[in-house]
Amino acid sequence: MRKTFWLAVMAYLVPTFPLGYFWHLVTFADRYQRLEMYRAEVLIPLGLASMLVQALVFAWAYPRLFPPARVPWQRGALAFGCIFGTLAWSFVVLPVAAKYRMASVQDFIVLETCFTALQFAVVAPLIALAYRVGERASTQALSA
């Protein structure tokens, strides 16, 4: 079960870091620059630390909320993505838009909403599959 937990942590971290990096600092860097809200040099270690905390919490929560033995992985992935994607959006997008100065609140909300939706569309199935693989492995070990 510990291997499955760490696999789920990696299922969140491995796609989230490059997705976040390329989305914010490469692909849409000029749009974020026009928002005039980010520092010139972003502090990547802080962003990575945030992702690690999220990965640990999500990997811990997934099997408790969507037990792989009882919930089909597709349903668990969809529910996880909807619930935690919405929660992440409410923690990141709305309060930042409410509190920080930026050239366009609407542009920020659109960019970050799209990012959050894409992020959870990628990581939710990966976390669900990590627990599906772990459940199958433990079931096979018990029957062997």
Image: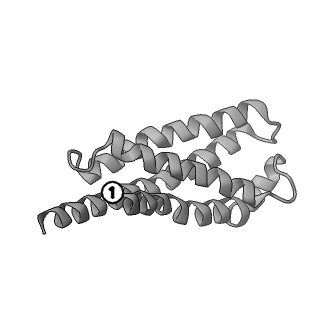
Q: Amino acid at mark 1?
A: Tyr
Query: Is 122 on the left or on the right of 129, as rendered?
Result: right
> Quarter of the image holding residue 40?
bottom right
Is 2 situated above or below 82?
below
Q: Which residue is mark 1?
A: 131
Q: Nearer the viewer, residue 73 or 107?
A: 73
For the point 52% across and 54% down, which residue is it? Answer: 119
Farthest residue, direction bottom = 144
Is 53 situated above or below 26?
above
Q: Position of residue 62 (x, y in %)?
A: 39, 46
For the point 36% across and 61% down, which residue is it? Answer: 130
For the point 67% across and 54% down, which residue is it? Answer: 49
Query: Is 105 on the left or on the right of 15, as rendered?
Result: right
| Badge 1: residue crowd in 10 Å (few <14, some 14–19, many ≥20) | many
Q: Secondary structure at mark 1?
A: helix
Quadrant placement of the N terminus: bottom left
Q: Position of residue 108 (x, y in %)?
A: 69, 44
> Quarter of the image holding residue 92?
top right
Q: Nearer the viewer, residue 39 or 58?
A: 58
